[in-house]
Image (tube, grey):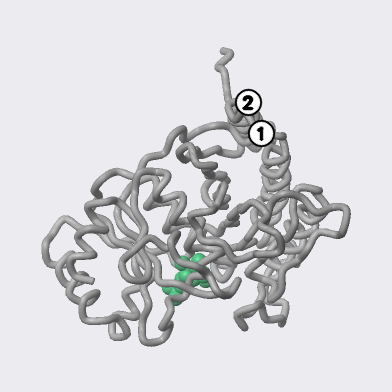
Amino acid sequence: MYKPVTTLTDFVLEEERKSKDATGDFTMLITHIENAVKIIASHVRMSGLVDIMGATGNKNAFGEDVQKLDEFANKLLVDNLRKSGHVYAVISEEMEKPAYAKEGQRGAYIVYIDPLDGSSNIDTNCPTGTIFSIYKTDGDNLLQKGSRQVAAGYAIYGSSVMLVYSAGNGVNGFTLDPNIGSFLLSHPDIKIPQKMKSYSINEAYESLYDEGLKSYLAYVRQTGGYTSRYVGSGVADAHRTLVKGGIFLYPANKKHKEGKLRLMLEVNPLAYLAEQAGGVAVSLNKTSPLTIMPTKIHQRAPFVMGSHEEVDLFLKYA
Ligand code: P6P
């Protein structure tokens, strides 16, 4: 029986038609990201069977072991985007320096990417993801506040492959139909529930947290009704929080004094989505990370996102 479906392409074209000064560049940029994500998804699904699993012996910009799959994802995304003609520069978690498009191929957008977030989970078959954050080119300035993002989103390689993004008009989720190879609108207008008694934090670091956070954790544990969920893959923890509500925290601690997550590559895109979905995100000084003026492309920031009521409760203790 015929049932109308909306593909990601249909959706982005419709959004383009709504925007009077749209040139089609953004539509093409999202399409390049979509195509790269489909290829990454097919490799992630096969990672246990082909020899692209396991570490490469290289280190990324943060001195972390690079898994072969995130090196593959990085090369694919960076090459795709640089040659697209729509991108001025790509900044990736896997590369210390930005990758600029060649002269004559430089476009209107700067794209920050975490090609395979949570890659340390690949060999345990836990969800991983690709995070992207898009800014308009601003001369050769690559450091803009998160509030200047024109779009942000992620792919999550989980029980299904989803692409979730916002261009400032709410958040929409698309699920890959492997039979036709298209992303179909499956989660229109995602809204974070105002409250949900679920908290997500790495509790193994408790001794490293500040007293306020310890008191918050003590409260949610003893008040009853709360559940704890933590995957340890940012996209998975953020996605669950986006669709089910609750609170996801990666705060600063004595080991990670600025937090572990990267401001431009993880915190800002996830915070943008949280706010677009009617939720809230906080970082330094209990304010939105989108207000932070970045000073380095790879700087880190503390991060909390989730349901308004759950984040408000956390802020009472923070
Ligand atoms: P921890 C994955 O390595 C990552 O960068 C994020 O995806 C995730 O949220 C975080 O680190 C998990 O860190 O210290 O809890 O293992």
Three-letter amino acid code at the position of disc 2: Arg
> Position of 236 compared to 284: left or right?
right
> Position of 121 compared to 179: left or right?
left
Q: Nearer the viewer, residue 93 or 129?
A: 93
Q: Residue at x 68, y 48 (%)?
A: 33
> Position of 178 compared to 240: left or right?
right
Quarter of the image containing the N terminus? top right
Q: Which mark is residue 177?
A: none
In the rendered view, tell whether residue 88 sits above or below residue 31.
Answer: below
Q: Residue at x 36, y 73 (%)?
A: 251
Crowding at dot 1, Cα within 10 Å, few <14 / some 14-19 / many 20+, comes out as few
Q: Secondary structure at mark 1?
A: loop
Q: Quadrant of residue 311?
A: bottom left
Q: Quadrant of residue 95?
A: bottom right
Q: Residue at x 23, y 71 (%)?
A: 318
- Can you give x and y, in whole percent of width and height, for residue 226 in the image? 20, 58
- Can you give x and y, in whole percent of width and height, for residue 44 in the image? 65, 57
Name the residue tied to disc 1.
Answer: 22
Mark 1–mark 2 Cα distance, whole angstroms, equals 7 Å
- Can you give x and y, in whole percent of width and height, for residue 179 in the image? 67, 33
Label 2 CB sits under 8 Å from any ligand 1 atom? no
Q: Which mark is residue 17?
A: 2
Of all residues, the one furthest to the top in this rendering is 1
Question: Along the polypeptide, which appears first: circle 1 or circle 2?
Answer: 2
- Can you give x and y, in whole percent of width and height, for residue 64 in the image? 60, 80
In the rendered view, tell whether residue 215 sits above or below residue 147.
Answer: below
